[in-house]
Amino acid sequence: MTLPRPASEATDASGPPRRPGVGRAVAVLVLAVPALAIPSLGPSAALHGTEEAAAPGVGGVALLRAVLFVALCVPLGELFVDRLARSVPGALPNVPRSWALCAAGAGFLASLALASVVATGNLVPHSLSEIDVGGLYASRDGKLALLEVNAFLLAGLCAGSGRPAAQVWPLAVVVVAEALRAHPATEQSPLIGSGLTLVHLTCAALWAGGLLRVLRTLRHWGPAEPGVALLGLYARVAAVLLAALSATGVWSSLRRLPPGALLETLTDTAYGRALLAKVLLVAVVAALALSARTRLRRAPDPLTACVPARAEVAALGLVVAVSGLLTALPLPIHW
């Protein structure tokens, strides 16, 4: 017996099989190739030819920051999507195992390593004797580093307890500490910058971590109606998150780049190059999100939206990596 072919593979009498979405795929690849060039090569490529000096251990610090951001995204996304799932009619009781405890452990180790760097005067320690733990209490950055270490430890305890929802509070402390750390008191209007970073980081964590949790939940639920409803509910909220993420990102970037030489800064400084790579990657993510939303609304099987959504998760992982790199590179100098 011959099985009927899906509509997507059906041939038309007027020509060869149609391949929907080829134009979008080509557009995504065109954006992805230059976007991946800089972050994949690392800090040395971003700094090459800029005559800027790299801080000691810039590659390691960038990696640790990326791990810290992932450790924020995973549990916040789980809490966010699990709450959405409870509002879905007919939601199934089986949910994927939480990764929050592992994320808290990774965040604790990453924040502890970053605190050791702060304790040695922002130098990479080569022995335990070089780490001045007491000196952390004497500086603003040291206190924020210790706050993040303790917050991840508390988040892990909450994740392993009977009330995992309580971890939202220590995770919120980490977000606030990161927002304050990114904008020292010597910066012009540091509270405005911290507020922008606070919103930006929160939206990014909910978007990236939430999408990962949605896809894992759909694998458990299977092709059931509640899964489609959950994906649609997340897509509506994600559109708002993307708008807020874009607005705060643009505003923050304009505050940090010299107003009279934006284009030169984007191409001639390490920070500008990494920022440009991040913008291109976000454009890739937005294109994939649009493709997933279109499939969700128009495709005969709405769950085919999971295909571009999985690619979106991978692209978001690259965005997190570039974000970690941005925090380790020197800021452009305003003349």
Image (cartoon, rainbow, N blue to C red):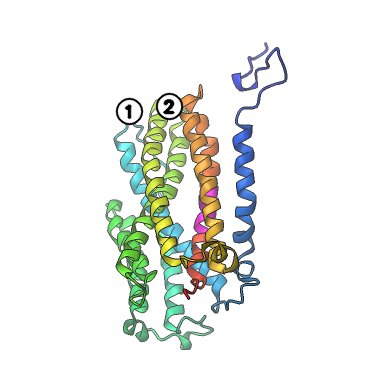
Across and down, in percent, residue 243 comes to: 39, 46
Depth check: give the residue in front, 155 or 314. Answer: 314
Which quadrant of the structure image shows residue 195? bottom left
Residue at image point 36% right, 35% down: 233
Checking the image for residue 90, the label placed there is 1
Dominant secondary structure (helix, strand or loop) of the stretch shown in magenta: helix
Q: What label sits on residue 193 in the rendered view?
A: none
The amino acid type found where label 2 is placed reads Ala
- Crowding at mark 1 (Cα within 10 Å: few <14, some 14-19, many 20+): few
Q: Is residue 85 left or right of residue 36?
A: left
Say left or right for 29 vs 205.
Answer: right
Residue lying furthest front in this view?
Answer: 260
Instruction: Tell me: residue 10, above or below residue 280.
Output: above
The one of 13 and 213 positioned closer to us in this rendering: 13
Q: Pointer 2 and pointer 1: residues touching (CB < 8 Å)?
A: yes
Magenta segment: 315-321
- Where on the picture, by quarter, is residue 30? top right
Q: Tell me which numbered mark, 2 or 1, is placed earlier along the sequence.
A: 1
Locate residue 35, reporting x and y percent.
Answer: 60, 53
Q: Is residue 87 above or below residue 73?
A: above
- As shown in the figure, which amino acid type bears the numbered disc 1? Gly
Q: Is residue 156 left or right of residue 321?
A: left
* Disc 2 target residue: 224
For the question of whether residue 63 can be seen, the reply is no
